[in-house]
Structure formats: C-alpha cells, structure tokens
Amino acid sequence: MVFLDRVYAGMAPVTIPNIPPGSHRLNVSAEGFEGILRTIDVTAGAADLAVSLREVQLDASVAVTHKHRIGSCSGQLVATPQGLRYETTNRDDAFAVPLTSLASFELDYAAATLRVKLPGGKTFNFTEPSGGAEGLATFHGNVEKAKTRLAKGDPPAS
C-alpha cells in the first residue's frame, strides 16, 4: 500500500499524477514487512521511485551517561544498520562496532540501565541523563529488531 502525504494512493506499483513540486511524505507498507516512511523531494516532470521493503532501516540515537567505577561521561549512542557507536569527548570510551558483533546488548528496565558488551569483553553501562528508561527502551527495541532482521539475511539500507 502506498500513501503520499497520508493520502492513500493505491497498491504498488502505482502512478501518482499531478504531485506539486516540493517535499512530501511517502509511506509504503506490505503485510509481513516493516513499512517505510520517507521524505521525498519532488521536482517538475515524471520520475520513477523504487523502494525495497527487505532493507533494514535503522537511524536511532539516545543521549546517555556512561557510568565509570569512579565518575561518568556523557555522549550519544547511535545505531544504524552498519553498527552501534558511542560518541563522546572521552576518547578512551568512544567505540564503533557492527551490530552483529555485539557480545551482549541488554536492557535492565528496572535499573534504567543499558548494558553493552563489546567483542573482547569491555562492558559499558549506560543510563539516561534524566534517570528514566523510556529512551533506552525505545532505542534497545529498535536495535534488537534490526539485529534480528540482519541475522535473517535482510540487507542493510545504504
């Protein structure tokens, strides 16, 4: 099913006539697949657009605090189909690792902690600066869904 600007356009393949130039929201979905929501820029004239529902889409981030034995540092956990990275000004803690290489990736919702274990054994315990766990839970869920699909052989979006 194809929607443009939240208006049903039909079943793919579909031709949508008279789209005014500018930015538009495209939503494509099919039973058994993760839907795609994308902003597209339309120019005058005819154009073809192809989407792949098998591609793993992931563009997630969450502000975090990494608890050290003594002290802590702050940064951003960022996840794409290509991997997970911790962006921080503390160069000794920053990392980037493919999603499929994570030794463990566990959320303890009650303790509001996301535990990430890298290959080689280094472990990070992340919390949200606010002290809650909602952002961590959403981030964890999105990453786990992508990891599962990648493990099944679905290709990462480029």
Image (spheres, rainbow, N blue to C red):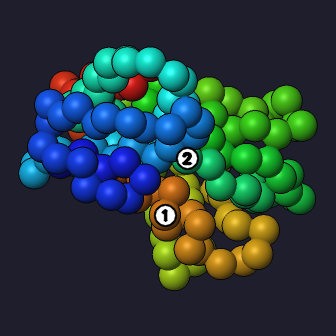
Residue at the far front: name it.
18
Residue at screen point 59% across, 74% down: 133
Q: Nearer the viewer, residue 73 or 84?
A: 84
What residue would you read off at disc 1? 138
Could you say where residue 155 lies in the image, as x and y percent from the top left? 28, 22
Visible residue check, residue 118: no
Taking the image as shown, residue 132 lies to the left or right of residue 90, namely left
Q: Amino acid at mark 2?
A: Ala
Q: Earlier in the sequence, mark 1 or mark 2?
A: 2
Q: Secondary structure at mark 2?
A: strand
Q: Would you place residue 43 above or below residue 26 in this image? A: above
Q: Amino acid at mark 1?
A: Thr
Residue at screen point 23% across, 32% down: 15
Residue at screen point 88% across, 37% down: 90
Taking the image as shown, residue 149 lies to the left or right of residue 23, namely left
Q: Marks 1 and 2, Cα distance to the nearest angstrom? A: 9 Å
State yes or no: discs 1 and 2 in contact (Cβ < 8 Å). Answer: yes
- The mark found on residue 60 in the picture is 2
